[in-house]
Image (cartoon, rainbow, N blue to C red):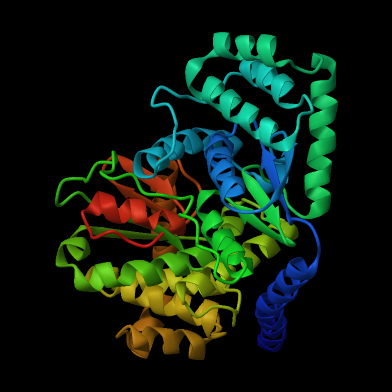
C-alpha cells in the first residue's frame, strides 16, 4: 500500500474509532429514557474455562444492577477466528486457575481440558430452556462439574435438573452460533450490552463503568464484581526470576502493555535486570490469518481499553510487511546496548497513536531518534534484515514452547499468561505494588 493510501486508510480508522464514544453515549441516553430494564446477553460454552469464570462474574453483575439477562449456549468458535483451538483450550484452563487464585473466583486446581463425552452431557443440561437467573445458576453448577467434580456429577445434574435429547444438541448449538455471528461476534465467554461486546473477565470493568454512569443519581455504587483475593493465592516469584514479554509491533494490545510496563522497566532496577523482551512478527506474517470482522472487534476493544487507561490511541498506520520487518531489524541491532525496549515502545507509540509509517525512512528515523538510536544506526540495521527475522523466529519458537501463540504474552516463573489485562497478575508475580486492573 502506497504512503498516500496508508494515510487515507489511517484517517478513516481514526474517524471511526473517534466516533465510538459518541455512539456509546447516545445509546446509553436512549437506554435511560426507554422503559424497562436493559438487556445483557451472555454467550457461554461448556468446555470453555473462561465461560465458567464469566458465569460467576455475570451472576454478581445481574445481582448488582437492574438487567434482563439473555443466555445463549454456543459451541467452539469457527476455525478462521480461532487459529490455535487446542493451545487456547489448554491455556484457558491454566489461566482460569491463575485468575481464581488472584481474584475471588472458583476454579478447581484439579481441572483439565474437558473430555468430549462430558462436554456432550454438559451441553444437554445447559440447553434445556429455563428462566434466565435459574439458567445461570445451572450453568454455574455445570461449570463446577465439568471442570472439577467430574462425569458422575454431570450425570447427577442431568438426572435432577433435566436435559434435552442428545439429537438436539448439535443442531441447537449450530443455530446458536449462527446467532452469535449474525450479531457480530465469534467467541464464547462474551457479553453484549448496548451494542458493544465485552470479551473475557477483565472487560467487565468497562461494562461496570458504563452501568455506573447509567445509574440513577445518588444511587450507591455496588462493589466491583472483579474483586482481588486477599491474600492472593498466586505466588510471588523469587527475585531475579526472568520477566519475559512477547510483543508485536502490529498488536495494539502489545502497545498498551508496553506503555503500562514502561514505569516498571524504567523505575524498578530489579525489573529492568529481569526483563527479556521478545518481539516477533505479526500473526498474519506467521501464517495465522485474522478475518476482517475480528480485526474490527479487536480495534474497537483496544480503543475502549486505551481510553479507560488514559493511553493515546487511534491514529494508526499498519506496519504489516516491511514496516514490521524494519522494526525487527532495528530492534535486533540495538538490543544488546539496552535500547531495545525504548525503541519498541517508541515505534509502537508512533504506529498506534501518531500515524507514523515505519515502512518509510522518515518514520523509522523519527521513532528511533526518540529512543536514542541514530539514523546511521538505523541505516546499518536495515542492511541486515535477516538478523531481525532470525530474532523474530527465535522468539516465536520460544512463545510456542511456552504453550502460547498470541501477544502480548508474559512469563514470570510459574506464571505464563496472555493479554495486557493480565498485568495485575504479572505485577504480583514480580513482587510489585498492586496494579489497577
For image coordinates 68% across by 48% down, the residue present is: 81
For image coordinates 57% across by 24% down, the residue present is: 141
In the image, residue 248 sits, relative to residue 24, either above or below, namely above
| Residue 414 or residue 209, whichever sits in front | 209
For image coordinates 61% across by 57% down, the residue present is: 284
Looking at the rendering, in which quadrant would you find the N terminus? bottom right
In the image, residue 66 sits, relative to residue 215, either above or below, namely above
Looking at the rendering, in which quadrant would you find the C terminus? bottom left
| Residue 400 or residue 432, whichever sits in front | 432
Quadrant of residue 35 within the rendered picture: bottom right
Q: Decide if residue 250 is in sight here.
A: no
In the image, residue 197 sits, relative to residue 213, either above or below, namely above
For image coordinates 59% across by 79% down, the residue present is: 314
Left or right placement of residue 125 versus residue 100 in this view: right
Q: Position of residue 223 (x, y in %)?
A: 46, 54
In the image, residue 325 sits, relative to residue 274, either above or below, namely below
Left or right placement of residue 364 versus residue 11 in this view: left
Q: Position of residue 19 (x, y in %)?
A: 70, 80
Q: Position of residue 175 (x, y in %)?
A: 85, 36
Left or right placement of residue 273 versus residue 248 in this view: left
Amino acid at each position: 500500500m502506497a504512503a498516500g493510501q496508508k494515510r487515507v486508510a489511517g484517517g478513516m480508522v481514526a474517524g471511526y474509532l473517534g466516533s465510538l464514544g459518541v455512539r456509546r453515549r447516545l445509546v446509553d441516553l436512549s437506554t435511560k429514557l426507554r422503559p424497562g430494564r436493559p438487556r445483557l446477553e451472555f454467550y457461554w460454552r461448556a468446555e470453555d474455562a473462561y465461560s465458567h469464570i464469566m458465569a460467576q462474574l455475570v451472576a454478581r453483575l445481574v445481582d448488582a444492577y437492574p438487567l434482563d439477562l439473555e443466555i445463549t449456549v454456543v459451541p467452539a468458535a469457527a476455525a478462521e477466528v480461532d487459529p490455535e483451538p487446542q493451545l487456547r483450550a489448554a491455556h484457558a484452563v491454566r489461566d482460569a486457575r491463575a485468575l481464581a487464585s488472584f481474584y475471588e473466583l472458583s476454579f478447581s486446581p484439579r481441572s483439565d481440558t474437558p473430555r468430549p463425552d462430558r462436554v456432550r452431557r454438559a451441553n444437554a443440561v445447559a440447553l434445556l430452556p429455563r428462566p434466565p437467573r435459574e439458567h445461570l445458576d445451572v450453568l454455574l453448577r455445570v461449570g463446577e462439574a465439568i471442570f472439577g467434580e467430574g462425569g458422575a456429577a454431570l450425570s447427577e445434574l442431568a438426572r435432577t435438573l433435566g436435559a434435552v435429547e442428545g439429537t438436539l444438541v448439535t443442531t441447537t448449538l449450530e443455530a446458536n452460533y449462527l446467532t452469535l455471528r449474525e450479531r457480530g461476534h465469534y467467541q464464547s465467554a462474551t457479553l453484549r450490552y448496548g451494542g458493544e461486546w465485552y470479551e473475557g473477565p477483565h472487560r467487565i470493568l468497562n461494562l461496570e463503568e458504563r452501568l455506573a454512569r447509567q445509574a440513577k443519581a445518588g444511587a450507591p455504587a455496588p462493589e466491583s464484581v472483579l474483586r482481588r483475593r486477599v491474600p492472593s493465592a498466586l505466588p510471588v516469584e523469587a527475585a531475579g526470576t526472568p520477566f519475559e514479554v512477547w510483543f508485536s509491533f502490529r498488536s495494539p494490545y502489545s502497545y498498551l502493555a508496553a506503555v503500562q510496563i514502561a514505569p516498571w522497566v524504567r523505575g524498578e532496577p530489579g525489573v529492568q535486570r529481569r526483563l527479556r523482551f521478545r518481539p516477533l512478527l505479526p500473526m498474519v506474517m506467521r501464517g495465522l490469518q485474522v478475518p476482517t470482522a475480528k480485526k474490527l472487534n479487536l480495534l474497537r476493544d483496544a480503543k475502549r481499553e486505551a481510553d479507560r487507561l488514559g493511553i493515546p490511541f487511534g491514529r494508526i498506520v499498519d506496519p504489516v510487511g516491511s514496516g514490521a520487518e524494519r522494526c525487527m531489524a532495528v530492534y535486533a541491532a540495538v538490543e544488546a546496548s539496552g535500547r531495545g525496549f525504548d525503541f519498541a515502545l517508541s515505534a509502537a507509540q508512533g504506529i498506534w497513536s501518531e500515524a507514523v509509517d515505519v515502512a518509510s525512512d522518515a518514520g523509522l528515523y523519527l521513532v528511533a531518534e526518540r529512543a536514542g538510536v541514530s539514523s546511521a544506526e538505523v541505516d546499518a540495521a536495515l542492511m541486515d534484515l535477516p538478523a531481525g527475522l532470525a530474532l523474530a523466529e527465535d522468539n516465536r519458537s520460544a512463545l510456542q514452547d511456552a504453550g502460547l501463540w498470541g501477544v502480548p504474552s508474559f512469563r514470570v516463573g510459574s506464571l505464563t499468561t496472555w493479554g495486557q489485562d493480565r498485568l495485575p497478575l504479572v505485577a504480583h508475580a514480580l513482587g510489585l505494588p498492586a496494579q489497577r486492573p
